[in-house]
Image (cartoon, helix red, strand yellow):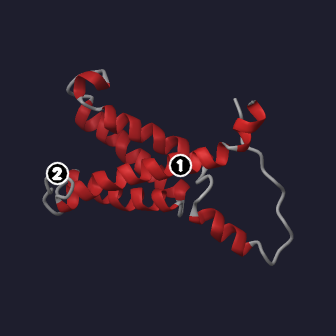
């Protein structure tokens, strides 16, 4: 059973990345363009407009699996800032201060920094193309706890 689950790990990680990226992109689009029932923020307003741009661009890159680690790093930091500067001053626990979304996005993006894009990402496609002319790289196995 463990062997089958381990062999599916890149695909599960790829689907996780796609869902997180899509939700993060939708959150940014909602704030920037007022779509999906959101309200627009004023252009250049600190920190809301900048957070929305990071959500839209970072979420799109994560969704596509392109520069996933860098996009996830910036996105995770933006959500940590959102939690500690916007939500946490209201109350300590995320359930009390409505910071569950910021906390979950922060940790989901943090995970993607270390795991990479998984399957279905453009990172893998470009890595395969760039290494096509060179000798094959050693197979890397995922870290398991």
Determine contact: label 1, label 2, CB under 8 Å. Answer: no
Mark 1 highlights which residue? 15
Residue 9 visible in the current orientation: yes
Q: Is residue 137 left or right of residue 32?
A: right
Mark 2 highlights which residue? 37
Q: Is residue 92 left or right of residue 141?
A: left
Q: Quadrant of the C terminus?
A: top right
Query: Residue 50, relative to residue 16: is it above or below?
Result: below
Residue visible at 44% across and 48% down in the picture:
19
The foreground one among 94 and 20 is 20
Q: x, y percentage for residue 25?
A: 35, 56
Based on the displayed image, in which of its 4 quarters is residue 1 positioned? Answer: top right
Residue visible at 14% across and 57% down in the picture:
40
Q: x, y percentage for residue 64?
A: 49, 62
Q: x, y percentage for residue 135?
A: 86, 70
Based on the displayed image, in which of its 4 quarters is residue 6 positioned? Answer: top right
Residue 50 visible in the current orientation: no
Query: Residue 67, relative to residue 14: is it above or below?
Result: below
Based on the displayed image, in which of its 4 quarters is residue 52 positioned? Answer: bottom left
Residue visible at 46% across and 37% down in the picture:
107
* Extreme residue in the right direction: 135
> Badge 2 local density, few (<14 within 10 Å), some, or many (20+)?
few
């Amino acid at each position: 059973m463990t062997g089958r689950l381990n062999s599916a790990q890149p695909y599960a990680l790829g689907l996780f990345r796609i869902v997180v990226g899509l939700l993060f992109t939708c959150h940014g689009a909602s704030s920037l363009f007022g779509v999906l029932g959101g309200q627009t923020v004023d252009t250049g307003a600190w920190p809301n407009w900048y957070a929305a741009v990071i959500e839209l661009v970072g979420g799109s890159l994560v969704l596509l699996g392109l520069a996933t680690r860098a996009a996830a790093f910036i996105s995770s930091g933006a959500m940590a800032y959102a939690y500690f500067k916007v939500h946490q001053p209201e109350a300590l626990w995320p359930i009390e201060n409505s910071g569950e979304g910021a906390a979950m996005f922060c940790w989901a993006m943090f995970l993607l920094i270390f795991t990479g894009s998984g399957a279905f990402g453009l990172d893998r496609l470009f890595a395969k193309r760039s290494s096509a002319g060179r000798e094959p790289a050693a197979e890397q196995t995922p870290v398991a706890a």
